[in-house]
Amino acid sequence: MGVRNYVGVISTVGCANDVAHWIAQQIKGTAPFLHQAGCGQLQPDLEIATRTLISLGQSPNLAGVLLVSLGCEGVDADRIEREIAASGRPVKKVVIQKAGATVALNEGLLLAQALVSEASQIKQQEFDDSQLVIGVKCGGSDTTSGLASNPAVGATCDIVLEKGGTCVFGETTEFLGAEHILARRAVNKGVADKIFKIVDDMERRARASGGDMRGGNPSAGNIAGGLTSIEEKSLGAIVKGGTGPIQDVYNYGERVQGKGLFIVDSPGREPEFLTALAAAGVQVALFSTGLGVPQGFPFLPVIKVTGNPVTFKRLPDHIDMLVEMAAVKGSGLKATGQRIYEEVLAVATGKQTKAEILGYGNFPGLYTLGPIV
Amino acid sequence: MELTEKAIVVNSKDNVATALADLEAGSSIDIDTGDKLLTVKLTSKVPFGHKFSLVHIESGAPVIKYGEAIGIATTAINAGDYVHVHNVVSTRGSTGAEGGAK
C-alpha cells in the first residue's frame, strides 16, 4: 500500500544517470533515482546495489518503473527488471548501448509517458493505520534533537506500533555507546546479537580504513551545539525509535517484512540512509533535526521535525513542524507524538511536505562498503 | 507555552544538566532533577544546549545523562562547572575499544 503513485525512473548504473535525469525532467509524474553505484565494485557491493535497486523498484510509492541501463554494467539489469516485475507493477527498460543515448531517451520518454498514464488511473483507497510503514531519521543534530524532536518522534513510533503498524530506523553509527540499551529491547537473543554485530562490524570497518569513530562523531557541528561524546549523541539519537521491542535487524537495501519496530543496518549519512528507508518499504519518513537540513527523497515524503525554535523560524522552506522542549516534557510527550502522527496521516493522504514542494532530494546515495575498482 | 526553566535534567540519575538558554558565569540556576530541587551556581558561562555539573564528579568517574554514562571525567569537575569535550572523554569508538560496552 503506497501513499504516492510515482513512476520511478531508476538508473541501474552511474553511466546511465544522464538519460534517466533527462526523462524524469520531461515527464511529469515520474521520480528519478540516480546514483554512482552498479559497476566497478567488488561482488559484495554489486550485491548491495542489486538488492537496493530491486527493493527501491518495489517501493509502495511507485506505481510503475522505467529502468535505464547502460548495457555492460556490473549489476544484472535483467534480474533487477525481473524481480521488480515480480512485485506486480509494470516495469520497462531502455538500454543505452543498443543504439545510443538519444534513441534510449526517445524510447524512454514514450515508455515513461505510458506508465504515468497508467498510474494516473489508480484510484485513492482507504486503508487501515496498521498498514502504515514509517521510517525515522535524525540529522544536523543539536541538543534540542536529543531533548525534544527525537523523543517526540519516538513517541510517534510508539503510536504507530500501538496501531499495529511498522517503524524502521537505522544509522548504526549512532548506536555506538548505546547498543547495549537497544539490545535489551530485542525480541530474542538472536536479534540482540545482530545488534551487537552490526555495531562491531561498523567499528571494524572504520578501523580498517584508518579511522577513529570518536574523531568523526560527534561532528564539529554537533560539538558546537553542545554534544560532548558519541555516547551522548547515540543516547539522544536512539530515542527517536521509541520504546518498542525490536523485531529484527535487516541488511542495507533489504525490504522489511512484518509488523513492528525494525532496524536496518545503515550509515547515518542522509543520501544513503534515506535510500535505505525507501528500499525497506517505508511510505513516509520523519526526519528530526536541530540545525535544520534540506534533504528529501524523490519518491518518499520526508517530514522535517525540529525542537529548535530558532531553526524553525530561520528555515521555513525546509522544516515542517516545531515541537518545543516545554511541550515535550513529561506528560506532554505523548500528545506531541500524536500531533506528529496526525501530520504523518495527513501526508500519507496527500499533503505535500516542504521538501516535496521544493523538489529537494534528487541526489540520493547508494551505500558502498569496499573500494571502487 | 511555559519555558521558564533555564536548564533541563533528562533523567533523575544524571549528574549534569543541559542549559536551555545562554547562562552567565556566577548565575544561580534552580533545577528540578525529577526527584529533588537543586540550586547550582555556575563557575563559568554555559551556552544554550551545553552542559554543567550538578554535583562534584571525581576525575575518572562517569558523566551521566539520559541515566547512562556519556563519558568519563578527565579531571575533577565541581558542581556548576561547564562540562564538555575539555573535561570529558568518550569510552567508545577509539581504537581498541571494540566490544567494550557489552
Image: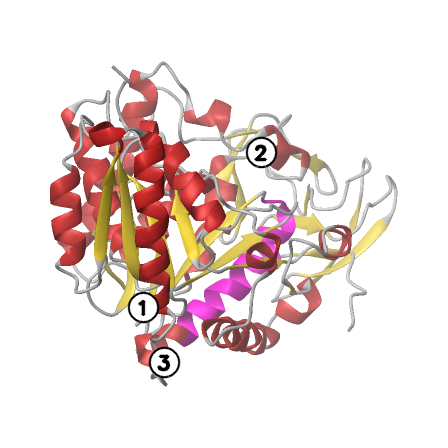
Q: Amino acid at mark 1?
A: Glu
Residue A26: horizontal and vertical position, in percent?
48, 48
Q: Are marks 2 and 3 in contact (CB under 8 Å)?
A: no
Decide which of A121, B25 is in the foreground and name it: A121
Q: How many marks?
A: 3
In the picture provided, is B84 more to the left or to the right than A348? right
Q: Amino acid at mark 2?
A: Glu
Q: Amino acid at mark 3?
A: Lys
The quadrant in which the N terminus of chain A is found is bottom left
Q: Earlier in the sequence, mark 3 or mark 1?
A: 1
Query: Mark 3 = which residue?
Result: A123
In the figure, B45 relative to A191: above or below?
A: above
In the figure, A68 relative to A27: above or below?
A: above
Magenta part of the protein: which range? A141-159
In the picture provided, is A333 more to the left or to the right than A317? left
Query: Mark 2 = which residue?
Result: B58
In the picture provided, is B48 more to the left or to the right than A291? right
Color style of the picture:
secondary structure
Q: Quadrant of residue A140?
A: top right
In the figure, A99 relative to A143: above or below?
A: above
Q: Are marks 3 and 1 in contact (CB under 8 Å)?
A: no
Query: Mark 1 = which residue?
Result: A118
- Mark drawn on residue A301: none
Residue B51: horizontal and vertical position, in percent?
67, 43
